[in-house]
Amino acid sequence: MHPPADATLVWQTLRSLNPGPRLIVTGAVHGVETCGTSAIRRLQAELAEGRHTLQRGQLSLLPVCNPLAFRMGRREGEGDLNRKLKLRASPAGFEEHVANVLCPLLLEHDILLDLHSFQSQGQAFVVIGPDMPFVKSREEVELARHLGVNRFVEGSPIRTEVPVPPEGGASTAIFMRANGRYGVTLECGQHEDPAAPEIAYRAILNALALYQLIDARAPAPAMTPVSVRTRRTIIRRGEADRFAKAWQSFDAVTVGELVGTFSDGEELRADRDAYLLFPDPLARPGTEWVYFADAGERFLPRHAG
């Protein structure tokens, strides 16, 4: 299967003559999540006007990672790009063709800032890597703390319970970690929230300042961090599955509380006191409906330094 002839990934790469970190910023991995696209294009315009100058290192800006889904106004084109990241000798679908271009581009960088949004209402938060240490875990936490938000999810919500096809693949951030690099996913707010593009834009500037890629004051770290750790994934079974209320990410539930009801009448109740993440009333059957999370530890005050 071949992608459409007009399918193109368009990015901008700036390289300073001075050595330094190599940062890539991505948007629209999912086609309806356009806050990152808006923020990246805003920065590109400011770079063209000379309002910012790359002082060292390398910066790549990719406003639209999935042009098919973006053009169609859908989360996915032929599949979920954020579950497809790996190189393939024989790509079978559009997102796999994208992955074969995106993976080498990611590997040209040390750091990833991936900009997303979500379906339900709620505040912005950052997703970082797993509890278990990996080669750049400390650096990843530092990046997360300086993006301008104070809510954090420790450990990718992509869990083993989620069905992954045999040809599988990773998310952008997991792909970076697996290859000795690091990256965070910033969930900037609800898809249509007018504040989300500004949150994304400020996060990009904060990252550029943190790594001294532009001449700007280093950002302050999150002062009152709230963090949770993903624990359990719930898959939507059918179109008639319903939540008990309009949940938002970081909503707290108590043991036994009704979260939702499946189409066969089975109730989904909290198995212990927990938090909810990514409740998606529009999730397709067979995909992630909601996540349960416990209180996290990696952003406790002793780490705030």
Image: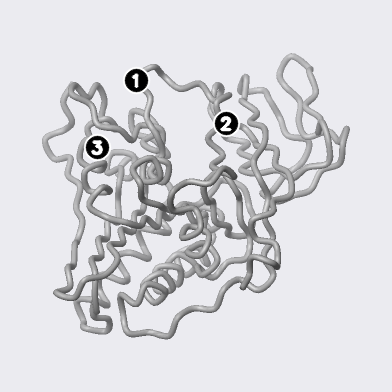
Where disc 2 sits, the SS reads: strand
Q: Is residue 72 left or right of residue 127?
A: left
Q: Amino acid at mark 1?
A: Glu
Q: Residue at x 31, y 56 (%)?
A: 110
What residue does disc 1 label? 167
Mark 3 or 1: in front is: 1
CA–CA distance in space, label 2 to label 3: 23 Å
Q: Residue at left 47%, top 57%?
A: 140
Quadrant in the picture for the N terminus: top left
In which quadrant of the rendered view does residue 60 lie?
A: bottom left
Q: Amino acid at mark 3?
A: Val
Give the number of the disc on residue 288: 2
C-alpha gap between disc 3 and disc 1? 15 Å
Residue extending furthest toward the top:
264
The residue shown at (26%, 70%) is 20
Tell me which numbered mark, 3 or 1, is placed earlier along the sequence.
3
